[in-house]
Image: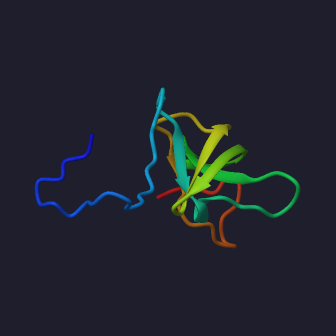
Amino acid sequence: EVDNAKRRLAAGMFATARLSINEVPSVVVPTGAVRRAGASPRVFVVSGGRLEERVVQLGPEQGGVVTVLAGVQLGETVVTQITPALFDGARVL
């Protein structure tokens, strides 16, 4: 049911809706956080004060973010914008 107290909806009108069924928490990152050079996508995770480059398995992409199915755990800190200056093992200040 849709609230139509202001009578803006009329018979014959069309709408687009998205339904979320059985939602589970997922890791999502901005698309700019993914390095797509080479065969496997990668992200940089901050671990122990250093950058750790990880191969990730990606899921659906929507609205500027992409789901990470494997390679990053919920709650880990990910670099959100990849630049050429980033490298595995770099110290994070």
The answer to whether any part of residue 49 appears in the image is: no
Work out which residue is located at the far right of the displayed protein and give it. 39
Residue 53 in the image: above or below residue 73 = below
- Color style of the picture: rainbow
Measured as percent of width and height from the top left, residue 37 is found at 81, 64
The answer to whether any part of residue 62 appears in the image is: yes
Given residues 92 and 5, the one toward you in this image is 5
Measured as percent of width and height from the top left, residue 87 is found at 70, 60
Could you tell me which residue is drawn at 11 percent across and 53 percent down? Answer: 5
Could you tell me which residue is drawn at 46 percent across and 58 percent down? Answer: 93
Could you tell me which residue is drawn at 66 percent across and 58 percent down? Answer: 34
Measured as percent of width and height from the top left, residue 14 is found at 42, 60
Work out which residue is located at the far bottom of the displayed protein and give it. 84
Q: Work out which quarter of the rendered image holds the N terminus and state it.
A: top left
Given residues 55 and 13, the one toward you in this image is 13
Occupied quadrant, residue 70: top right
Given residues 17 and 14, the one toward you in this image is 14
Work out which residue is located at the far front of the displayed protein and give it. 11
Measured as percent of width and height from the top left, residue 12 is found at 38, 59
34 left or right of 38 in image: left
Could you tell me which residue is drawn at 25 percent across and 60 percent down? Answer: 9
